[in-house]
């Protein structure tokens, strides 16, 4: 049994170091998010009626320009309590972005880990070719 555990740990480390996705949750798709393009996100915004756009940057960045309808939810403030207050329904369609795409990946992963089931990360506002409001 001990040898199997060691082999599993070594395998996971090798996979993680080589960039292969590893899930400690088993083979299910639970606790994951989906990365989409800006155009896919825009299509969802244009065709869906019930969704939430999350800008996970800081207040000053949000104030300097954001996607219309976006709600500010800085990545550093995401935890179980704040997420529950802002997004009580874990099946809400969430579209997550930041400046360049790094913080949005972190935020999307955190939200998925908290049990949100429809989390879509679409990168950064730097690559957003559509309207922005101040």
Image (spheres, helix red, strand yellow):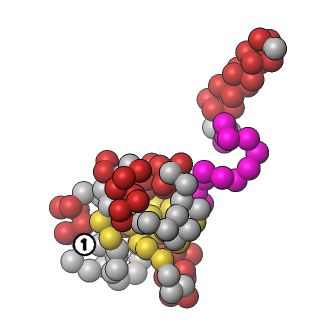
Q: Confirm whether the magenta stretch covers residue 33.
A: yes
- Classify the position of the N terminus by image quarter: top right
At 41% from the left and 59% from the top, the residue drawn is 84
* 134 is higher (above) or lower (below) than 103: below
* 80 is higher (above) or lower (below) than 17: below
Residue 114 can be seen, yes or no: yes
Q: Pointer 1: what residue?
A: 65
At 73% from the left and 15% from the top, the residue drawn is 6
Structural crowding at the residue carrying mark 1, measured as other residues with C-alpha within 10 Å and reported as few (<14), some (14–19) or many (≥20)? few
Horizontal side, residue 85 vs residue 25: left or right: left
Q: Position of residue 107 (x, y in %)?
A: 43, 53
Q: Secondary structure at mark 1?
A: loop
Q: Kindly report the secondary structure that dominates the magenta region of the rendered protein.
A: loop
Q: Position of residue 42 (x, y in %)?
A: 49, 80
Horizontal side, residue 52 vs residue 115: left or right: left
- Classify the position of the C terminus by image quarter: bottom left
At 38% from the left and 49% from the top, the residue drawn is 79
At 44% from the left and 66% from the top, the residue drawn is 88
Residue closest to the eye, 13 or 53:
53
Horizontal side, residue 73 vs residue 43: left or right: left
Picture quadrant where residue 8 is located: top right
Residue closest to the eye, 102 or 45:
45
Residue 100 can be seen, yes or no: no
Q: Position of residue 68 (x, y in %)?
A: 33, 80
Q: Position of residue 73 (x, y in %)?
A: 32, 61
Q: Confirm whether the magenta stretch covers residue 134.
A: no
Q: How many marks?
A: 1
The residue range painted magenta reads 21-36
């Amino acid at each position: 049994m001990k040898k199997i555990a060691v082999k599993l740990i070594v395998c996971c480390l090798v996979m993680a170091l080589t960039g292969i996705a590893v899930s400690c949750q088993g083979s299910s798709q639970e606790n994951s998010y989906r990365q989409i393009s800006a155009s896919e996100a825009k299509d969802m915004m244009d065709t869906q009626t019930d969704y939430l756009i999350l800008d996970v940057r800081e207040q000053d960045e949000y104030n300097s320009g954001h996607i219309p309808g976006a709600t500010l939810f800085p990545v550093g403030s995401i935890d179980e309590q704040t997420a529950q207050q802002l997004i009580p329904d874990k099946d809400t369609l969430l579209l997550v972005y930041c400046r360049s795409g790094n913080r949005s990946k972190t935020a999307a992963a955190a939200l998925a880990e908290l049990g949100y089931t429809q989390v879509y990360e679409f990168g950064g506002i730097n690559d957003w070719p559509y309207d922005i409001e101040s």
